[in-house]
Amino acid sequence: MKDAYGILNQISADMVLDAATGKGDFINILKQNLKSFTQIIGVDASERSVDYAQKIFPENNVEIYRMDLEKLQFDDAHFDLVCLANALHHMEKLDLVLAELLRVLKSGGRFLIVEMYRDGEQSEAQKTHILLHHWLAAIDTSFGVYHGKTFARHEIEAIVQKLKLKKLQWCDFYIPVDNPKDGRSCEGLKRNCLENIKRLETLEGTEKLIEEGKAIMERIANVGCASPSRMMCVGVKV
Ligand SMILES: C[S@@+](CC[C@H](N)C(=O)[O-])C[C@H]1O[C@@H](n2cnc3c(N)ncnc32)[C@H](O)[C@@H]1O
């Protein structure tokens, strides 16, 4: 984690875009770790997430808007730093979204991507999280919400290479957990699984997914769960 924050510590940016901000978790990381910034704008398509994020950032230098990344309502070259954190595999039209993000970034500005990957060296507890993630993606898909499988590391690299950024910096990191079988967080995850199983019971033809969910709950109890490894990549737009 230190290296990832170290990359952020070097960045001074005036206007910052946090694309697919969700509930704004990455905005908190930016606020705490960027060398300096003037304004952070978070955008997301989800009304619920936007309502939540608008409430938790009352300060004037953070603004949250509901917006589709496929059609950003910003002028060309508006931002000095554009971030897409933990959201690459949520993009249905990834090429279109990346083109939009590049459009609103100034030449000489920085593009930052954070994304978990499904391969590489992952502990058994991290593998639980990856299975859980893929299960949740399949549930979203069953309910008509796009959520792709997580990428392999080389796939993320290939996506970044296509952006033709210069001065690329890469770093792999994970959020360490003391005890992956920690009662409280495992109980929370199991509750989340049960809620999703209940949702699945309202749909026909989801028996296999329900069984998968039960197996994941057992795995959480037996080997625990931990946040998977991610990569952070930052490059400069030519
Ligand atoms: C896992 S969340 C990312 C959360 C956040 N960036 C973080 O690091 O905590 C993925 C988000 O992508 C958003 N999303 C997916 N497609 C989108 C689109 N076309 N335009 C805007 N947001 C989109 C979803 O609404 C969801 O909030």
Image: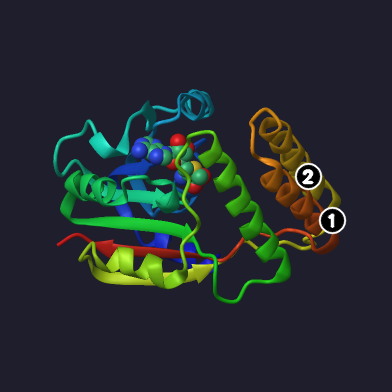
To which quarter of the image does residue 114 belong? bottom left
Task: Give the amino acid at mark 2.
Answer: Lys
- Indicate if the residue with disc 2 has its beta carbon within 8 Å of ligand 1: no
**Is 71 drawn above or below residue 186 in the view shown?**
above
Q: Nearer the viewer, residue 52 or 192?
A: 192
Q: Position of residue 171 (x, y in %)?
A: 45, 71
Q: Position of residue 71 (x, y in %)?
A: 24, 35
Q: Position of residue 188 (x, y in %)?
A: 77, 42
Callout 1–callout 2 Cβ contact below 8 Å: yes
Which residue is label 1 attached to? 221
Which residue is label 2 attached to? 190
Q: Is residue 27 visible?
A: no
Q: CA distance from mark 1 to mark 2?
A: 8 Å
Quadrant of the rendering where the N terminus is positioned = bottom right
Task: Give the amino acid at mark 1.
Answer: Ala
Q: Is residue 88 visible?
A: yes
How crowded pointer 1 is (Cα within 10 Å; few <14, some 14-19, many 20+) is rated as some
Give the residue drawn at x 80%, y 64%. 223
Give the residue drawn at x 51%, y 41%. 141
**Is 177 drawn above or below residue 90 in the view shown?**
below
Give the residue drawn at x 22%, y 30%. 73
